[in-house]
Amino acid sequence: MEEFEKKDFAKIIKRNLSLVHEDIKKGINTAVRLYDRNIESADVTVDLYYPYVRILDYSAISKSQAERDEIIDLVSRFSYTPKEKVIFFDRKKGEVKEKGSESLEIAIKENSHEFIVELLKYQDTGLFLDHAVTRAMVEEDSYSLDVLNLFSYTGSFSVYAAAGGANSVVSVDSSNQYSAWCERNMRANGFLDRSKYPVLRMNADEYILDALKMKKKFDLIIFDPPSVSLKHGAKSFDLKKDYIKYIAALNMLLKKDGAIIFSENLSTFFLDKKKIKKFFSINEITNIIRKENFTKKHFLMRCWVMKKERDVMKKIDENTSLDELALVFDDVKKESKRKNHDEKSRSTNYSERKALKKNDKSSKKPYEKGRKPALFEKKDKNGFREDFHKSGEKKEFRRVHKAMLPYGMDDIRKSRKSDED
């Protein structure tokens, strides 16, 4: 890094650290992002997991030892952390999680809740810091609610929901490792009642079908799936392909006026609101949950609150599959298109019939036989006839003078005048 970049790097770390300094001293928040790839030459994130600091390198080419030492030195000095407690984790673009040979587990606090994080073994520590505000929202709104945390990972949302006074919190994840991790986090925060806070090791689709058969209902569902989930070496979940059928199924698991909090981190993901707006009112909260220490450019996560408006299907039998529920969305979209087309056709035919009945000359086309358009009647400020913009002449004018449009309207008018002469 250049000297001016080093100064900017240091300023960012010091500023973000100052925002949480008092919380760290009080033990309220001991996990926070200090730097988020703000400078191009320092393409790293710096996260404080007190008393450790973890640097995650996003560079396409691994940094040399000298470059690593330089960044470690700057982070150590301006985060007031000893070098032996600064961890540098190399993450090449496109890599998936890889197990390391060493392990370092510590307990940190977020809004006074305790979570276990792993700093050496995996790329992900077990707590996504970009969801801190979302978790706080769940805690605030979950009192006396029945909550389902699907793809629960290490259970951070479950902890917040339980802390907010939820009537029940069900955590579902297919990974034995993450389910065990979730149980540890729940125990660390004093939520020991397994009947009230069950942690289930099973695939999300299997749980949904079982819950539908048992007619279970929830007030709030956390749907924070991975982009791709693997099972026995094959894809068992693909966000872009499968999200519609999951949202359709979750609609049937929601109580009246229940809501889904849906989030994703895939840059190429597109939420087809037209398919689901008949069943949900949709509100994107991405800009609300992004904290100022996360750069907008690299904040890939998007989040929506989907409030249930109506059921996808009135009745579900034991043989109903997730794919069948998803087809309802497709049928609604086709029906909506067909309805709009029919309404448009009806209104057009009616207006034409009405115009013909009254012999309304204004209904005639601009170049209809018998009409001789006057090109220079009642000119507006740009030199055009008042009804010019409503007629087909505008399209003809654009076609003839298309090559001259970049030169401005004055040149076009001059050209037009010379043509008349």
Image (cartoon, rainbow, N blue to C red):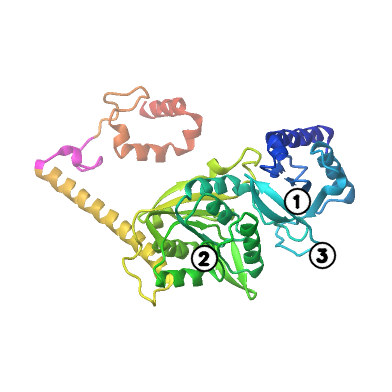
Q: Are marks 3 and 1 in contact (CB under 8 Å)?
A: no
* SS for dot 3: loop
Number of dots carrying numbers: 3
Q: Is residue 158 left or right of residue 272?
A: right
Question: Which residue in the protein does label 1 denote?
Answer: 56
Decide which of tag 2 and tag 1 comes sooner along the chain: 1
* SS for dot 2: loop
User: Comparing marks 3 and 1, which lies closer to the viewer?
Assistant: 3
Viewport quadrant of the C terminus: top left
Name the image quarter holding residue 104.
bottom right
Question: Which residue in the protein does label 3 denote?
Answer: 101
Q: Is residue 243 left or right of residue 384?
A: right
Q: Is 368 colored magenta in this rendering?
A: yes
Which labelled disc corresponds to residue 195? 2
Percent from the top left, x then y, of residue 352? 17, 47
Instruction: For marks 3 and 1, give the CA distance.
Output: 17 Å
Residue type at the position of mark 3: Ser
Residue type at the position of mark 2: Ser
Highlighted magenta segment, given as a residue range: 358-372
